[in-house]
Image (cartoon, grey):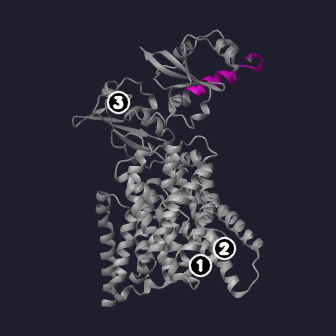
Amino acid sequence: MDFVNLPILLFGLLLGVSVLTSLVSLRIGIPLILIFLCIGVIAGIGGFDMLETLQRPRICFFIGSLALALILFDSGFQTKMKNYRLANRPAILLATVGVVLTALLTTPFAKEVLSIGWLPAFLLVAIISSTDSAAVFFLLRSQGIRLREKVKAILEVESGANDPMAIFLTVSCITLIQHQASGTPTSYWMLTLLFLGQLLIGGGVGYLLGKAIPFCVNHVKLETALYPIFVLSLTLFGFALTNMLGGSGFLAVYIAGLLSGNSTIQVHNQISKFQQTITWLSQITMFTCLGLFVTVSGLEQYWKPALLLGFVLMLVARPVMVWSILSFFKSYSSTEKNFISFVGLRGATSILLALTPIVYGLPFADQFFNTIFVMVLLSLSLQGFLIPLVARLCHVTVPQTTLPPAVAEVDLPGLADSSLVLYQLTAQSPVVLGTPVPRWANPALVVRNGIAYSSGTIRKQLKEGDKVYVFLPSASRRLELDHLYGDGNDTDTVDPRDIFGDFPISPETTFGELVSLYGIHVPKDLLSTAISAFMKQEFTDIEVGDRLAVDKVELVVRGLKEGLPTSLGLDIDPTRQRSFYAKTRIMKTELHKNIDKASKSDIIEE
């Protein structure tokens, strides 16, 4: 039974070593995928006969494609829609036009350095043109570095969206090279239609899949442990179907992950953790398999031109491309552009695509694979080591005086994205400094000196060092919660108006004055009524943060004394608040009932 046990033993050994080396990566600050590659190289050089099957190009390409599809789905699933909206235009340009521009800028150098033709040179650069953010964020997390939101967002979206363009350019170049070798006329219209087909079919199937996954998960009754496997099956089905229809399966799974990850979906926490586990397993398997193809003789032969091309890509092509595109967006400073230019790490997709010339039997396949492998090693090692330093020099980090809040997602019926958030308060936390706590943000539990207190006994006396547990029914207010209980350094990520309105008004303001100033509608019999008097009459339990909807605006309770509002805020754009909690909903309903009772002749419009 050695033919069964020995491969399992070796696989378990490689897997265990790969996982344990994460401890080394955390300590010395190098990308973990670089270690996975090195383990694969060492295993390949070791000459294990049982690994010969994995050293077949088609099998390795199949494993890599499957792994990359799962990685891209998880990349989209973990990307917050707010990050996508924050940087979608510049990031999409970097992921499409930027990939082409990078290839065009680097191709002349590749042609001269490797002494090859224009098409092969462009093919090599197209293979290496996509970026990998997984290594970047792993390094930043391991060293406790937090990037500014817009910088993090553009890197996250760009790296997830640029793989399909790199794949299309690679396949197109291989097609042109094969036509050139066989003397077949090249139809550029056909390539254009191929690109549009990959884009439209991939985007369309991805959108449908992104809507179908939450719908199926929310309506199909399964054992909790089966939902992540169900999502995995739908992902693989959508990936294969898209490719068979002529679309980009990688684009489809990324879009599907982005849409489903930002949808209301039950057991979201289990699915997310399962996806992260599968992603790590995919990366370990993928990079270990790709490392098996590396030979010492190949590295010795091509390392000098590969290093030269790597530096050209890192120090010339990438910066020129980023500055050319981001110059159209005035919100990015020069230091932010410099950091984005530097953070162009090459990774999974580049090495996988390096197998395509081998799979298609091109004459320069071995040269390309070894050259690209060295370029990826250079990017991961040099840029990987320097990223934390460059981030600080470019001033794109956000001070973090405390550990980020611990989040435990809670799966409750009807509250698919609910969570329990733990904050450890500091002297700079707004709630410690006296900022009122809205009703929806009341702590569920406070732990002080190892003793647990209910929120009603200690909420108004929160102190530095308290551990506060807050139940959050919806992720839409997470930033506001971080602002209240965090370390006070997130003023660039949260708009205070979302909590207490645009500007203060007196509680003694009458509804008639609101009508004259803002042209809103109220019942005629309320025109002379003060807002505070109306609230006292209609509601018996008012707390800070409660909102009263008045036509198109909302009044927010900013301060209280003896149960009466002492300060109000006026929110002229309440659509920023995507959802209100129970008390807000009640107050809104009561006033609307009063408005509904009045006849049209009683409604005043300024």
Label 1 vs label 2: CA separation?
18 Å
Q: Which mark is residue 428?
A: 3
Residue 224 showing in the rendered view: no
Q: Residue at x 60, y 65 (%)?
A: 103
Measured from the top left, where is residue 171 in percent x and y? 63, 74
529 sits to left or right of 344:
right
Q: Give the magenta-colored segment's residue range.
A: 587-603
- Mark 2 touching mark 3, by CB under 8 A? no
Q: Nearer the viewer, residue 195 or 173?
A: 173
Tell me which numbered mark, 1 or 3, is placed earlier along the sequence: 1
Residue 172 image label = 2
Q: Give the CA distance from mark 1 to mark 3.
A: 61 Å
Question: How busy is the neighbourhood of tag 3: few (under 14 within 10 Å), some, or many (20 plus)?
Answer: some
Q: Position of residue 262 (x, y in %)?
A: 54, 51
Disc 1: which residue: 116
Q: Nearer the viewer, residue 351 or 371?
A: 371
State the image quarter where residue 387 is shown. Answer: bottom left
Residue 364 at x, y percent in the picture: 55, 83
Residue 15: give x, y in percent of width and height: 34, 72
Q: Assign a secondary structure to mark 2.
A: helix
441 w.r.t. 216: above or below:
above
Q: Amino acid at mark 3?
A: Gln
Q: Earlier in the sequence, mark 2 or mark 3?
A: 2
The image shows residue 570, relative to residue 83, as above or below, that is: above
**Residue drawn at x 39%, y 28% as measured from the top left:** 430
Q: Quadrant of residue 123?
A: bottom right
User: 392 and 533: which one is in front?
Assistant: 392
